Image: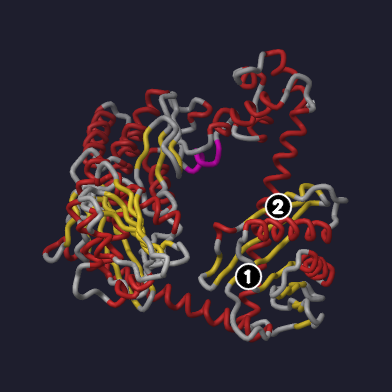
Amino acid sequence: MSGAGESAGNSPFDGKAFVRTLATRPGVYRMLDAQAAVLYVGKAKDLRKRVGSYFLRPALQPRIAAMLQRVATVEVTVTRTEAEALLLENELIKSLKPRYNVLLRDDKSFPLIHLSGAEDYPRMGFHRGARSRGGRYFGPYPSTTAVRETLNLMQKLFRVRQCEDTYFRNRTRPCLQHQIGRCSAPCVGLVTPAQYQHDVRHATLFLDGQTTTVVDELAREMEVASTALEFERAATLRDRIANIKRIQARQYVSEAEEDADVLACRIEGNLACVHGLFFRNGVSLGGRSWFPRIPEGADEGEALSAFVAQYYLEHPAPALVLVNRPVEEGEWLAGMFSERRGRKVEIRHAQRGERARLVEIAERNAEQAIATEAASKGTLRARWQGLADLLQLGAPPARVECFDISHTMGEATVASCVVFDAGGPVKSQYRRYNISGLAPGDDYGAMRQALARRFKRGQAEGGPLPDLLLVDGGKGQVAEARAVLADLGIDGVDVVGVAKGSSRKPGLEQLLLGAGGRVLTPPGDAPGLHLIQQIRDEAHRFAIGGHRQRRQRARDSSELEKIPGVGTRRRSALLRHFGGWAGVVEAGIDELARVPGIERALATRIYAALHG
């Protein structure tokens, strides 16, 4: 790593002199301001040429010129290859979130369909995350809705089971899915392994896009059944062929005969949208919109180029990526993606023909999505301003935190903290606190403990403080919050309690203002109240989720640990093997004895303890 900065006399950064020290090798550069905050991260095939383009050009875009005026230091990291530079740039952008970079936010891994391993009756189901389990994966799909719809089709067409393994192993009679014709009931042996594998093979071919092969094989089977006078089976196969053809006619898109993604970017004001259409084996999997963070003054080409680089480092690229704007260093990126994929990837700016028509469809979707998002943000801005007016804050708060407590008769108490800013919920900063050492049902003590832990840690780490602190409760909770802030010497945080009104109906909440003890009962249609309700409900949801998890863990652990011979390791093995407490309870002695470390005598004791 190397770098250069301002001199002791605070002279401006000499970019031209710095460029002369750089190597003509691939790498990553970081531009920092006088406070060492990273302004921009970029990659380069040739560091000297790329960094020199900022300081040696006679004229620059206003946004770039404004950024360079703030640059006090440039740091560079030389990499061995261009691919390493691309990977390092992506990691630094995600971790540092520089102000002048386009940032793809909140992108989760795409959902997949997973077909389990080599057992007689494999399961087909939804999957998200690492491909760490055996079996086959299909996708990725653009949304969970697309996966659910496809799995629904698999049930209708091929009747492959989708139930969890613990549920499957413990059935004694067919479930409702069999009764409505969506499962062949392998759990109770109503289909042979050979017949079931035959259906699995057809489902796999269908998901691979080989629909014609499936139809041809089913047609031959129908003829054989008809010749053998098995008219009921022939009719079933006929109906399956008709359903497949109907689905194929509805989903097939002739213009996208190969695996392809179609991406279009639109920018309105400071809001950017990238919409993607996804095609696999000529079948449309639907679309999805992203709203990346962009620096002021960024254009659509720049935003799209950054999106392509960041997105396809996280997700496998198809053979063809069609875009509505030329992608900067598109050939280089395509080469990197080809190397990672093991097959050729092309990035093309479609300008005419059928490909251009697909790009136009993506553009229209991007325009619609950005209009909807802008309207939503406009409503959110109105709510934030309404909140400021309602509480007489002078200006909308930049950061709001809300605390809530959840328990069942004092059991497994959990406190939640949710964070909102002008853009909505900041889920990466949500926190849960397991409350301990208090009398059951001590809500005031629980609130005090959670607030103390949050603000003590915030002070120690120098983290951000809220402008407005909401607590779910009345005067007692507000008093605890104000006491914690006073004990820690924290000023400038407005505290408001959100109490249910006398009728406890939504829209009739009372707001208790901490400073003067005033009580507000705003009208039910007040925008500021709507925002408070949204934040309070989110804190409540998050607290309940944590409480239920903690309560279930406690119950799972306590019941099993009461059984002689079952320690922490065996308890974990049982829960892991059966997928949770319900699976352990449903298991028989033979199933329990199959768990590693559980001999038959112990399995008998466990079964007796759980069913005695």
**Which residue is at a point 73% across and 52% down the rendered structure image?**
414
Which residue sits furthest left? 353
Q: Is residue 177 magenta?
A: yes
Among numbered discs 1 and 2, the one appearing first in the sequence: 1
Residue 224: percent from left, percent from top: 25, 28
**Which class describes the residues within 10 Å of circle 2: few (<14), some (14-19), or many (20+)?**
many
Kind of residue indicated by mark 1: Val
Q: Is residue 548 magenta?
A: no
Counting every numbered tag in the picture gives 2
**Which class describes the residues within 10 Å of circle 1: few (<14), some (14-19), or many (20+)?**
many
Q: Is residue 24 visible?
A: yes
Residue 583: percent from left, percent from top: 63, 32
Residue 361: percent from left, percent from top: 25, 67
User: What span is colored magenta in the figure?
Assistant: 175-180
Looking at the image, residue 75 sits to the left or right of residue 479; the answer is: left
Secondary structure beneath disc 1?
strand
According to the picture, the residue beneath numbered tag 2 turns out to be: 433
According to the picture, the residue beneath numbered tag 1 turns out to be: 400
Residue 165: percent from left, percent from top: 53, 32
Assign the magenta stretch its main secondary structure.
Answer: helix
